[in-house]
Image (cartoon, rainbow, N blue to C red):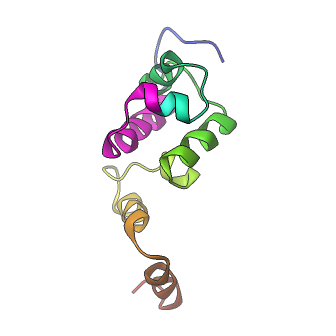
Amino acid sequence: MPRRNQADPIASKIGRRIRVLRDSQGLTQEKLAYEGGLKSKGHLSGIEKGLVVPTLQTLALLADRLGVELLDLFTSPEESPREQLIDLTRSMKAGTIRRLIRDGGG
């Protein structure tokens, strides 16, 4: 997908989320791009700025390298309590999540 002159709003939101997850793991753009199988650091930079609309394949590669679910790239915890809850589940143990599901979440 070609680089845009203006950021795409949805791509920008996803790009910001990728940057937050990357920063939380102490990864540089160069390291994530290389280990995530992307074309270049510049390509990742364009994704993070919303100037490149990533394919699902690219997002799956990034999610895999970041050790998160694809869903985690689409959540914005600062935007709603529900998305914050989804984000909190990233650090929960599988047993805790299963218990929440079994108990109906509350």
Whether residue 20 is in magenta: the answer is yes
Where is residue 5 drawn, in percent x and y?
A: 49, 8
The answer to whether residue 21 is above or below residue 102 is: above
Residue extending furthest bottom?
103
Residue shown at the point (35%, 60%) measured from the top left: 84
Where is residue 55 drawn, in percent x and y?
A: 66, 32
Q: Could you say which is closer to the camera, residue 48 or residue 74?
A: 48
Where is residue 20 drawn, in percent x and y?
A: 35, 41
Residue shown at the point (35%, 45%) measured from the top left: 25
**Magenta segment, which residues?**
9-31
- How many marks overall? 0
Kindly indicate the quadrant of the structure image that contains residue 4.
top right
The answer to whether residue 13 is above or below residue 77 is: above
Q: Could you say which is closer to the camera, residue 96 or residue 80?
A: 96
Residue extending furthest top?
5
Residue shown at the point (49%, 16%) measured from the top left: 42
Residue 11 appears in the figure: yes
Chief secondary structure of the magenta portion: helix
Q: Is residue 32 left or right of residue 58?
A: left
The answer to whether residue 72 is above or below residue 28 is: below
User: Which quarter of the figure is the C terminus placed in?
Assistant: bottom left
User: Which quarter of the figure is the N terminus placed in?
Assistant: top right
Whether residue 70 is in magenta: the answer is no
Residue 74 appears in the figure: no
The answer to whether residue 82 is above or below residue 49 is: below
Where is residue 15 drawn, in percent x and y?
A: 45, 32
